[in-house]
Structures are given as C-alpha cells and as structure tokens.
Image (cartoon, rainbow, N blue to C red):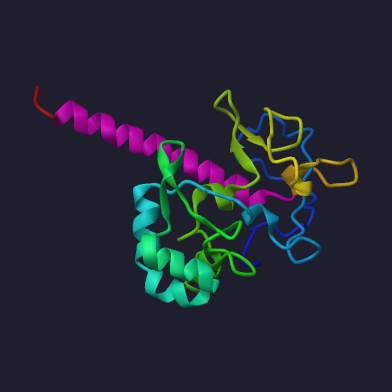
Amino acid sequence: MSNLPTTTGEVSEKPRLPLSLLNAATARFVCTYGRGCDGICCKNSTPPVDPEKQQQINSILPLVLPLLRPGASKLISDIGYIDPEEAHEGNPSIRVEDEWCVFFNKGCVLHQVGAEKGDSTLFKPVACYLFPIDHHSSGDWYIRQHGVDNEEWTELFCLAGTPDLPLAVSTLGFEMEMAAKQDDKIKLDAKTKAAEEEKSPG
C-alpha cells in the first residue's frame, strides 16, 4: 500500500459496488502515484478535519513532526496545523506550507504512520482517503471528474476521465467501501443525536 492514495490501479473482473454513485457507469480513474505522479492531489490541498480527527492527529503529533518537511514542522510548532479561516463542510482545514499540505513529505505522513499501526485511514482526513469519491451538489455520492459538477481541480490529470483509463468502479473498491462506512457512521450519529434530544428535558 502506498503512503498516499489507497487505490492500486488494478482492474477487478467483477467490480463491487457497495454504494450508489451517480456516474458509476461512465467515470474513469486510476491512481498513478509513484508511477508518474508525485502526489499532486496534496498540492495546495486543504482537507477539512472534524473534532474527532483532530484528536486523533493530535495524539501522534510528537511522532509526526520529525517526519515532516522542515518548514511544515516549524509552521505546526509555531501556529498549529489547523487553519480556522479555511473551512469546508463546517470544519476547519489543514494548513498548506510552501504549496503543499503540511503533512505531505514525499507522500502523506499521516497515511504512513497509520499504515504502520495497521490502519492507513486512522489519522488521514476523510476527504483524502475517499478521494476521488465525494458528495455531489445533489447530496449523492459521485466520482470527481473534469466537467462534472463544476469540477475546479482541472490541473489534476487523474480526473480527466479519458477513454484509455479503466472504469473507476474497478479501481476504487477500497474507497467505495469506506464511503459506505461513512454513510453508516453519519446515520448512526444522527440516530444517536435524535435519541439524546428525545431524552433531554424540555
């Protein structure tokens, strides 16, 4: 497993579809990190991190800091890795240093540390380990592609969806499973919150 993306680029004979994707029949994608791509999805990338993910990252900061680029390590030590002025989906985002995510150093350090502990997603932002799967403006899941849902990341060549690439559903099995689990978590959190509100007085 690479320390950046979680796709292998291998095409399965019978694609698994653990969740519904708006453009499953047409989207094409394969990750080429380490095979022509240096990880440009981490360049100027500011993924949001909720309180739970922040707590997880905070728990390994002493371990992570020496593994980062010197400038990124100093930035985090001085002012932290969270940029409160850059928010997405209601949560603050991770800072950028010298055009790269502060946790990028020839790959995602959060991915690397998590993988060493048995779970590459443990400290990695959800938006990163689900990429290129995301929520469409309609609220449904879809695979990000140039020309779909006003995609702005046009410099990211892996989103071009050219005909020579395999269907994305054949290369994104892990990401689809994780997105399905994310759906389950959202539903469970909503159910828990509703139950707590019902129990509260007044």
Res 114 seen here:
no
Q: Foreground: 70 or 35?
A: 70
Q: Measuring 37% from the left and 60% from the top, which residue is drawn there?
A: 79
Res 24 seen here:
yes
The verdict on residue 193 being magenta is yes
Q: Measuring 58% from the left and 28% from the top, which residue is drawn there?
A: 140
Q: Measuring 45% from the left and 64% from the top, which residue is drawn there?
A: 75
* Furthest residue toward left: 201
Residue 60 x, y percent position in the rendering: 39, 69
Q: Assign the N terminus to one quadrant of the image.
A: bottom right
Residue 128 x, y percent position in the rendering: 57, 51
Would you place residue 105 above or below residue 202 in this image? below
Residue 53 x, y percent position in the rendering: 40, 54
Q: Assign the C terminus to one quadrant of the image.
A: top left
| Quarter where residue 155 is shown | top right
Q: Foreground: 24 or 57?
A: 57
Start-end of magenta stretch:
171-199
Is the magenta region chiefly helix, strand or loop?
helix
The verdict on residue 130 being magenta is no
Is 160 situated left or right of 55 in this image?
right
Residue 13 x, y percent position in the rendering: 80, 50
Q: Measuring 20% from the left and 33% from the top, which residue is drawn there?
A: 196
How many numbered tags mark residues here? 0
Is 42 situated left or right of 126 in this image?
right
